[in-house]
Structure formats: structure tokens, C-alpha cells
Image: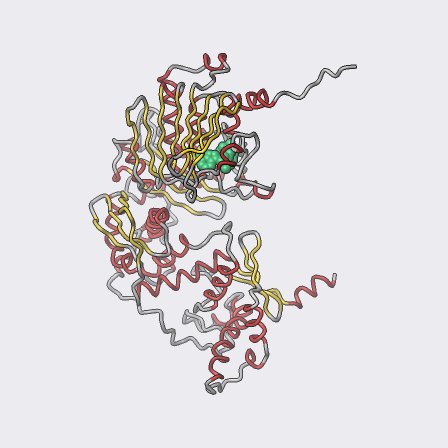
Amino acid sequence: MNSIIQLLPEQLINQIAAGEVVQRPASVIKELLENSIDAGATSIEVILKDAGKTLIQVIDNGKGMTPMDAIMSFERHTTSKIKTTQDLFNLTTLGFRGEALASISSVAQVTLLTRITDQELGTLVEIEGNKLKKNEPIICAKGSNLSVKNLFFNVPARRNFLKSNAVEIKHLLNEFIHISLCHPEIILKFTHQDQLIFDLTSTNLAGRIQQIYDGISAKDLLILNEETTAVNFYGYVGSPSIAKNARGEQFFFVNNRFVRSNYLNHAVQTAFESLIPKGHFPFFVLFIHLDPSKIDINIHPTKTEIKFDDEHSLYAILRSTIKHSLGQFNVAPILDFDRDPNLDTPYQYKNKEAEYPTIQVDSSFNPFANEKPVKSTSSFSSSSSYKKSEVQPSWESLYVGLEQIQGEEFGTSSFETEAVSSSLFDDVETEHEAGRTFQIHKKYIFSTIKSGMLVINQGRAHQRILYEEFLTNITVNKAPSQQLLFPLELFYSVNEMEMIKELQVSLEALGFVFEAINDDSLVISGIPVRATESQVSIVIDDLLNDLYQGISTDSYSLNDSIAKSLSKCLAIKTGTYLTEKEQENLVNNLFACKEPNITPFNKPTFITLSVDDLDKKFAI
Ligand code: ADP
Ligand code: MG
């Protein structure tokens, strides 16, 4: 008997999938822009005809594709972005399903021109309704240039379903605006019917908002930056004076994905209550970062709804963060009675005259002492200093051993400490030389020592290294800087500019070169060697915010706060792969620090696991 069940032809499978991924020209723009960003583009151009119905073209200067990849990219479920299930939980790209190009090319006529950097010739691929029409070498610019013509040409029902040009262009603009807000560092152009609508230069978030919304200036924007253990908020809310009587200029991004949430909207709305007239809506662009496992984000490409695990606390934190921000900028009084309002004075410039002594020499540092000298003058603190006294001596003595051994060569050794008399250090040295470090989960570095092993938290270790380096730069020797090819113009509110002027000397010592400092913007032509161009605006935003939020309350001076803030911002993060050489450098640099055991924020940077500990575990 003949079977009546059949496998669908590839073309039909793609068209069905396209029904989900490609609903209208705006979905195409979103997918193409995300691909360009994933390809590392720093400049992207969008060209449209008839609201995308006849042409949607995206040109980028990203890494491009090889001739083979250019063809492969149109196959279903082909992606360069993930390989294993594990990768799915460590996503660093916007795309991963490998569906977009296959879907788009099944319902349109697609032309791709693409070239990778180190090849002279690029590739031309033409596909129409999934059928390959052309595939040949061609001279073209580096990057990718993808044109999608006559969307739904082979699915008349869907084509007829498209709305008027005015409606479709609105959807297109929305997608474009979401992406441009997420990536203010990327140069973006948007042209419709030969008319250049957006011409966005590289800037920071505040600058990007002003580029998109003519009516908004830096003084209308209040920065928001709140880090809690569960969630981080970052972004801007508009001052009440620019609230409008229509929604629309309200953006939430969760883990860099645009989402709609009436619930969170409500949290913002109530934070503004009594500051704006009824029926008006505040402007905001807010980025929420939280552990992906805490959200049920249906990662379907077209979904923008989201469900949070603990919506109530998110609501409360968001609302109070905004209220606090409105209060700090004197827009609203801070209704927080537990707090001494004087403590809310954002920065401690009163103390600025007092020069912070150099950190080069710590006269209380006695490397041969068994107990770690404690900074505070409290007489009992050394005996009660939490884990320090356990962890520290073994490692400090390890480091001491190094000096000792070097010293011995010159016959100057006169101290016989426990650390040296044991052969602990020798072994460590040789094992290090053998390159015995390895990284797991892109988070921890393991290193063997004689008594067992060391587990170093890479991000925390790097914070410590950078912190000491920055502090030295500010107080003793000025850091070198790297010249930018094009000066970067960043916009700030008047308040923020005031702060930046106060910070200028310290920032210059760290390697920043300011070409101009205006009332609401600054032009940067040189940056610290430790930072990349795209990190600069984030570094400054974080710094301003940290100073507002009082990172300095437990700091000794403004410079100390600056070093802390920058080290936190620029340290490598969990998720960064390190080569063996980099791991080794990290370990060596960490133990060359004055206080390798803790981060500038007093968190442990490493733990040790002795063979005894391991033996005990196996004894069960
Ligand atoms: P996904 O983005 O989910 O991987 P796509 O169908 O959107 O799937 O793209 C398939 C593959 O084509 C990508 O994984 C990438 O390797 C390649 N690609 C797509 N667009 C570009 C681009 N603009 N530049 C470089 N490579 C690209
Ligand atoms: Mg994609």
C-alpha cells in the first residue's frame, strides 16, 4: 500500500519557516542588521525602496564571507555562531538559528556581494525563491552587501497582506531605531526612496538618543545605572519636561533585545507620578541585564513579549532606581527617609585638594609577617580579618619566596621563613614554566601548585591588576594613550559635564586626550591603551554613575574611586576565552600585585584547593 505521508520539499519547508521569521519588510531589516552586527561591522547602510517592498539592501563593513560560506549561508540551519548545545547557553551573537537567510531567500530575490579581508576577489550569489541563479567571483568591497528584492514575489497572498507604505516604513524605522540604540558605537545610515533619513555617527547612548530625537538635548536626559546582584539597569530617562502625550518613545531592552512589557512600563510611569500630567508618558531607553535563566524569553526571533521570574522585585527595583535618579538630579525630592540626604551629594570634590599619597611604597607591608598587615588602624582587625588570614599567608609567602630566591643568588638571603624552607616555591615555579594553567567555563583559571591547586577568578583577578595599574598611573606615572583615527564626540548633560571637568586631570593621567570640552559634549582624540574605542563611552558613563552612586563612600579618595570604577568596567569578563599565554600573564601579573588576594571591592580573587582537600573529598 502506498504511504500518504511525504516529506515536504525543501523549498516548501523554507517557505513555511519564512512565515514565522519573515512577516514584513521590518523583519528582514532586523535579521540583516543583526547579521551585520554579528559580523563585527562598524558601519552599516540601509537602503529601501517602497517601504522595503521592492528593495531592502543592507551594506556592511563586517568580516564578510568566503565563497563557500556565501553559498552555505542560505541553507537552512547553517550558522557559524553555535556548534554545540552548550554554546546555546553562552550566546554572544544575536543570531544562532541559521534560519534567516534561508527563509528570506525562499520568499524573495536575493543578491549577495561579499568579500573577506584577506582575499582580493569577492563572491556574487543570486538566489530567487531558494533557487541558485548565479554564483561567481566578483570585485567588491570588503564586507557584505545583501539586497532583498520583491519580498513575497512568489507568495501573492502574503504580499497582498502587507500594509500601506506609511505603515510598513514605521515598522522598518522602529527596528532600525532599536538596533541603533543598542549600538550607538556603530555608524548607521538609513535611506528611503533616495532620501537620507538617518545619518548616525559613532557616539555613546546619550549622543545616539539625541541623534535620533532632534527635540531632545543632553540636559533632558537623566542617567540611570543600578547594579544589584540580580539585575543591572542602565540607560536614560527623559526629564518630565519632555514627556509626551503618546507612548512610543519608550524602550526596554532585556539582555540587548527589545522587549515590550506593560508591567515594567507601569513601574516607570509610577516613578514619574505627580511629576508629569495625566495622560503623558516619560521618555526612556533602558537596558536591563539579568541572568538569562531568570527570564522566560521565548527566543523566537519575532517575539518581543517577555516573562520574568521575579517580576515583583524587578518592578520595585526599577521604580526606586528611577525615583532615585529623578531625585539626584533635583527633579524630585528623594523620599527615602532612612538616608542622610547629605550622603546623596554625588561626589566628594570637597576633598579634592587633599592629594592622595602615592601607592608605590606601603611602609606597613612586611612580607615576612605571618599575618597580613591590615590597612585599618583597628587593633583587633588583623586577628578577625575574615578569610584573609587563611588564604593570604600561603600566597604571600609564595610571592616572598620569589624575592628570596632572587636574593639568594647574590648571597643576601638572611631570612629563613617557613615558605622558603619548604620547597613549595620551587615546584610552583617549574610547574608554571611548564605552562600548567588552564581555563574552564571561560571564567576560572586553574594553576597547579605543590600543595594542590589554585583556582583564579579571571575577572576578579584582572580587576585587581588594572586597579593597581590605574592608581599608579594617576598618582605616579602617567599612562601612555592611543590616538584615535577619528575623534569621538560624546554628549553629556550639563551636570555630567561639570563632573567630567573635575575629573579631567585624573582622566588625562590615565591616557585620555581631550580635544575639546564644551558645555554639553566632549571630543576625545586619545584613549587609554587598556580600553577600546567602543568601550570609551561605557567607561565614562559607568564612572559618572559610580561617582553618583557613591562607589567612593568606602574609597580613600576620588582617584581611588576612579581606579576602582575603571578596573571594574575594563576587566575581562566571564565568558572571555584566554589563550594559555594570556592565562599565564594574568596569573603572573596578579601575583605581582600588592594585594593579589582580593579585588578592589574586597572580594577574593582566588581560592586554593590542597591535595588534602581533594583527598578528603575522595575519602567518602
Ligand atoms: P544566523 O544569524 O542565525 O547564524 P542567518 O541565516 O542569519 O543565521 O545567517 C547564516 C550565516 O551567514 C551566519 O551564521 C553567518 O555566518 C553568515 N552571515 C550572514 N550575514 C552575514 C554578514 N552580513 N556578514 C558575514 N557573515 C554573514
Ligand atoms: Mg542571523
Q: Is residue 274 above or below residue 330?
A: above
In the foreground, 315 or 400: 400
Residue 200, percent from left and from top:
30, 35
- In the rendered structure, the answer to whether residue 52 lies left or right of residue 478 reads right
Residue 99, percent from left and from top:
54, 30
In the foreground, 430 or 251: 430
Q: Is residue 334 visible?
A: yes
Q: Is residue 289 above or below residue 431?
A: above
- In the rendered structure, the answer to whether residue 88 lies left or right of residue 166 reads right
The quadrant the N terminus occupies is top right
In the foreground, 74 or 237: 74
Residue 226, percent from left and from top:
41, 45
| Residue drawn where x is 29% and y is 55% of the image | 512
| Residue drawn where x is 53% and y is 59% of the image | 580
The quadrant the C terminus occupies is bottom right
Q: Is residue 297 above or below residue 604?
A: above
- In the rendered structure, the answer to whether residue 458 lies left or right of residue 452 reads left
Q: Which of the 4 image quadrants contains residue 192?
A: top left
| Residue drawn where x is 49% and y is 76% of the image | 402
| Residue drawn where x is 45% and y is 39% of the image | 38
- In the rendered structure, the answer to whether residue 124 lies left or right of residue 330 reads right
